[in-house]
Image: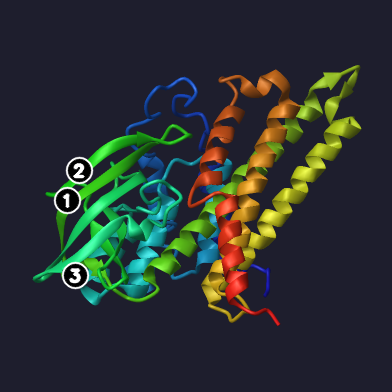
Amino acid sequence: MDFTFTEEQQAVVEAAKALFAGVAPDQVPSPALTPGAVAEDFDRALWSRLARADLLGLLIDAEHGGVGLDPIALCLVLRESAKVLARVPLLESSAAAWAVQAHGGDELRERVLPRAARGELVLTVAANGRMGHDPAELAITAQRDGDGWLLDGLQTAVPWAHNADLVVLPAHTPEGRTVLALVPPVQEGLTLAEQYSTSGERLGELRLEAARVAEADVIEADGAWDGLRDLLATGTCALALGLGEGVLRMTGEYTSKREQFGHPVATFQAVAVQAADRYIDLRAMEVTLWQAAWRISTVADSALPVAGDVAVAKIWASDGVRRVVQTAQHLHGGFGADTDYPLHRYHAWAKQLELSLGPAAAHEEALGDLLAAHSLS
């Protein structure tokens, strides 16, 4: 494993830093003061700038109008986006396009990928399941019907569902296989209801009753959902890392200026030790993130399948980002809870990321199952 980033990946980071430099984390109403969603739509202006910078097609091949890079490059951009709480479906749309490119048919790729790379087509993924802890692929059933498929079931907490053009739905067939169906959020047989995330974003509850999907819009390849789920989880780890780094930097700046007894509180041993512990958390989150992203990008052999590295990364991301924001709140004192100061927004986002695609305990259980099934000797 080589942690050195390529010139192309480093160039992507610089482009992302320049683009996100003008994004304010408090540009929408506070989730603490808003009974519903903080906004009806994601940041379309930022989405357009991402498209012009070719950052929406990072994982899409050049033949389809993309850049042709790997998931590591996407995670680098996600890391920068989370530092400013960028309100865009970059992870979901990029991951969905990646799955279409890897496993979709020629007609589906030609119809989806060029428009996704230009930002004209927004994709999202229903990965939460019915309750958030049950497998998402078991929430929907898919039954062949003539030249198409019929979908039935319920998916909850679908990010950006009200604003996306297509939702990628994992579903299980009577034979026990998992397929991916690309479904518009408004169609016959599909009911879309509102839900709200901890961070105040609008989510979607999708209820399907004999919703029909054309054959060309269903991906039947083995492993398509597993790969997509692993990429979503790894991207969530990248978001958690970027958010944590932004919070720790904010905390360092505050404790360096805040004085008690004539000295900056950052010089107090108790404060410095707590900040140092959180720095160690971030470095552990970083190394496990790049291990998982590298495994996905290279499909390298290992004693455990890729899901093992993803589980380790998500365990560190979930626990680590929670500890970082809790320590930040503690070191800020009452100022950290001030709704005119952005820290409380980072806390809400951190809680959402901690639980997205399963908390640490769920991934610890999955890792235990993998270790039991695979000999490491």
Q: Nearer the observer, disc 2 or disc 1?
A: 1
Q: Position of residue 271 (x, y in %)?
A: 83, 32
- Earlier along the polypeptide chain: callout 2 or callout 1? 2
The quadrant in which residue 162 appears is top left
Q: Secondary structure at mark 2?
A: strand
Q: Nearer the viewer, residue 13 or 270?
A: 270
Q: Secondary structure at mark 1?
A: strand
Q: Which residue is mark 2?
A: 191
Q: As drawn, is 191 to the left or to the right of 67?
A: left
Q: As drawn, is 268 to the left or to the right of 97?
A: right
Q: Position of residue 354 (x, y in %)?
A: 56, 45
Above or below: residue 248 compared with residue 308: above
Q: Which mark is residue 216?
A: 3
Distance from the alpha carbon under mark 2 to that under mark 1: 8 Å
Q: Which mark is residue 272?
A: none
- Earlier along the polypeptide chain: callout 2 or callout 3? 2
Q: Nearer the observer, disc 3 or disc 1?
A: 1
Residue sitting at x 69%, y 61%: 287
Q: Residues within 10 Å of mark 2 (few under 14, many from 20)?
A: some
Q: Which residue is mark 1?
A: 209
